[in-house]
Image (tube, rainbow, N blue to C red):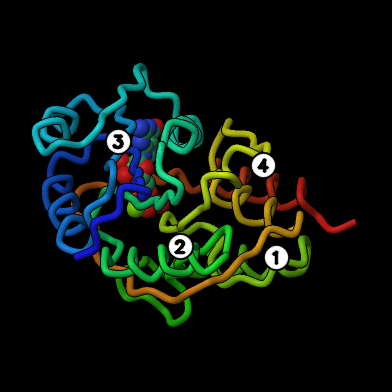
Amino acid sequence: MLNNVALSVVMITLNEQDAIGSVVQKIREVVEPGEILIVDSSNDKTAEIATALGCRVIRQHPPQGYGPALGLALKEAVGDIIVTMDCDDTYPTQAIVELMDLVEAGYEIVSASRLVTRPRAMPASNYIANVIFARLAGIICGVKTTDVHTGMRAYRKSLIHEFEFDPHGMALPVELLVGPVSQGYKYKEIGIEYFERTGQSKLQPVPGTCWTLKRLWKWRRR
Ligand SMILES: Nc1nc2c(ncn2[C@@H]2O[C@H](COP(=O)(O)OP(=O)(O)O)[C@@H](O)[C@H]2O)c(=O)[nH]1
Ligand SMILES: [Mg+2]
């Protein structure tokens, strides 16, 4: 286990009481972060469980949506390395170590792709949409990636504070990838496994698609 005070693991939560205990435990099995930061907009017991487990919890009520919650979490994180994950047991926490090592080696953004091979845990419609979005990122933005929407990434803190991103609406991970990479930040993608979700997905496919296309167009190569 790595004891790393410079690491913040950040997650945003909307009614993840069935997953949070297991996710926090699995994080601590592989690293001992300076903080596990949760921006919570739940109306279940997620925040209480997170607090009891020693996480730093910021409440965002009423819920403002995915982008504003993730934007707040990233800005509030204190670690020099910030790792994001969903709080739904879909991401392999062992990958945190590789993500951290790569940021320590000099990369400013390291993205964990779920789509190097087809993940069985992802519904076919989501898989097809994600493959198309990744191809469009190459065509429109000139950014080589297989997964613009992964929730698992490591960012160097300086990138989060220098790079001006728009947290409104959905698809913030898209902007946080194609924006910095088109501006020349040092980027690497690794492959990860992707597991079946605990609890219900909060994904909203139609606005999610609109925001994805909008953000890809915003960062089109000129
Ligand atoms: N605080 C907060 N968290 C949210 C909101 N919407 C989604 N989340 C969390 O964001 C993460 C990603 O959502 P998820 O349902 O897993 O989306 P999917 O992975 O695309 O199916 C989960 O941890 C959710 O609980 C929101 O409006 N506010
Ligand atoms: Mg998820």
| Three-letter code, disc 3 | Ile
Q: Position of residue 189 (x, y in %)?
A: 53, 71
Give the mark toward the camera: 3 or 1: 3
Residue in the image at 30% along x and 30% along y: 40
The residue indicated by pointer 2 is: 126
Q: Secondary structure at mark 4?
A: loop
The residue where tag 3 is placed is 38
Disc nearest the viewer among 3 and 4: 4
Quick one: which residue is furthest to the top in this view? 62
Residue appearing at x 25%, y 32% in the figure: 56
The residue that disc 4 covers is 163
Badge 1 amino acid:
Leu
The yes-or-no answer for disc 2 within 8 Å of ligand 1 is: yes
Name the quadrant containing residue 35.
top left
How far is disc 1 from disc 4 in space, using C-alphas?
22 Å
Q: Which residue carries the number 1 mark?
A: 136
Quarter that holds the N terminus: bottom left
- Does the CB distance between marks 3 and 4 fall below 8 Å? no
Kind of residue at disc 2: Asn
As helix, strand or loop, the secondary structure at mark 3 comes to: strand
**1 or 4: tag closer to the N-terminus:** 1
Q: Residue at x 56, y 59 (%)?
A: 109
